[in-house]
Image (cartoon, helix red, strand yellow):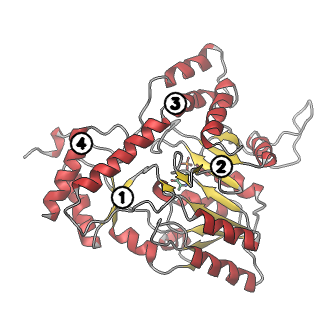
Amino acid sequence: MKTVSNLTKVWLSSPHMGGTEQNYVNDAFDTNWIAPLGPNVNAFEKAIKDELGNAVHVAALSSGTAAIHLGLELLGVGKGDDVICQSFTFSASANPISYLGAEPVFVDSETDTWNISPKLLRKAIESGIKEGKKPKAIIAVHLYGMPYKVAEIRALADEFEIPILEDSAEALGSYFNNNACGTFGDIGVLSFNGNKIITTSGGGALVSKNKNYIERAIFLATQARDDAPHYQHSNIGYNYRMSNVLAGIGRGQMEVLKNRVNARRANHQFYMESLDQFKEIKFLSEPEGYFSNRWLSCILTPSYEIREKLRLALLEVNVESRPLWKPLHLQPIFKTSKQFVDGTSASLFERGLCLPSGSNLLNEELERVVTTIKNVLS
Ligand SMILES: *Cc1c(COP(=O)(O)O)cnc(C)c1O
């Protein structure tokens, strides 16, 4: 039996360069565009725009979190406002609510997509209105790349006239009814953090069909400088624009996005087929019209105990796996926040495990994951 020390580490989701990234980075050096603006930023934004279609406008920013922060500000969220947020997500979906002095209202998930439940969302909105505090925005998330119930959530947003901030940080390359994720909200958010489907090492983008939002976002992201020869400010600004050096990485990465989606989907397919004999292990399937980039391949086990057995057995052979996101309404920092929950995300968290999902995994590594899981379950 091999020991951990002579087995290479298998990461959950590691960066995967395509080859042309460094050329664009070199261009930035050769032309001295070492700044949070320049040709790489423009070309990267254009590449994102072309990928998403639907006549969207794009602002490349320093992170997905920065994009959520600016997005909420653009939607008019301020001190004391209530903002509805999917509970089953990464903390960065909700932290910017607090940056603005607003209050999160957490809503649980449904079981078809693991994303925000339309039923509980209606309850949260109606309850807020009844108390004289209509929610200012809805943050819906395409978790692990699986689109949320786009039509149902849009219908509720329209019925109550509440804007949607679409957290598509994990869903670049995912589609619902042939429309790209990132284009469904009043404002959409992408992330290019190191563990995402493509990366600029760190970065994000704000997306909208409304050009005014994007112009305003760029203004606020570059210190909110008024039009004057001296530095004059009538607004509080931020330093949130993407560097031209990092946008060079993004340009190269956009060229291989389709490959990366195919590779991650192939990982998911491999896990599903390899573990088919274990009926107690469940995968999240794509409902009709849904196309997931399968950013992370997740399994649901029958219990917390089995989930932990698998996780620890994988660790033993130097494989990184991770429990599903801990719902935000269960996080110490948010435990006193308003919540509309029914136990769905708590159960997913207890029983679910993310398996190594990178587009650069080797066959030996995928086999190691599957063999280890099989040994535990048999
Ligand atoms: C990664 C992520 C973010 C934050 O993006 P950063 O670029 O890391 O700031 C926000 N929401 C979700 C769901 C994410 O996975």
Q: Which residue is mark 3?
A: 255
User: Which of labels 4 and 2 is toward the front?
Assistant: 4
- Along the line of sight, the residue nearer the viewer: 7 or 264: 264
Nearer-N-terminus badge (3/1):
3
Q: Residue at x 47, y 45 (%)?
A: 196
Image position of 117 (left or right of 102)? left
Q: Tell me the SS state at disc 1.
A: strand
Residue 365's mark? 4
Camera-side mark, 2 or 3: 3
Type of amino acid at the residue the image marks with label 2: Ala
> Residue 260, can we see it?
yes
What label sits on residue 67 in the rendered view? 2
Inter-mark Cα distance, 4 to 2: 35 Å
Nearer to me, 327 or 239: 327
Label 4, label 1: how far apart the Cα atoms are: 16 Å
Rounded to the nearest angstrom, the CA distance separating label 3 from label 1 is 27 Å
Mark 2 sits near ligand 1, with its Cβ under 8 Å away: yes
Residue 298 is labelled as 1
Measure the alpha-carbon separation of dots 3 and 4.
26 Å
Identity, as a three-letter code, of the amino acid under mark 1: Cys
In which quadrant of the rendered view does residue 222 lie? top right
The residue carrying pointer 2 sits among few (fewer than 14), some (14 to 19) or many (20 or more) residues within 10 Å by Cα, namely: many
Judge the density around disc 3: few (<14), some (14-19), many (≥20) Cα neighbours within 10 Å. Answer: some
Instruction: Look at the picture and state if 153 lies above or below 292.
Output: below
Image x and y of residue 312, in percent: 23, 59
Q: Which comes sooner in the sequence, label 4 or label 1?
A: 1
Q: Which mark is residue 171?
A: none
Q: Are discs 2 and 1 less than 8 Å apart at CB?
A: no
Q: Which secondary structure lies at badge 4?
A: helix
Q: Does residue 234 appear left or right of residue 346 in this picture? A: right
On the image, which quarter does residue 84 sit in? bottom right
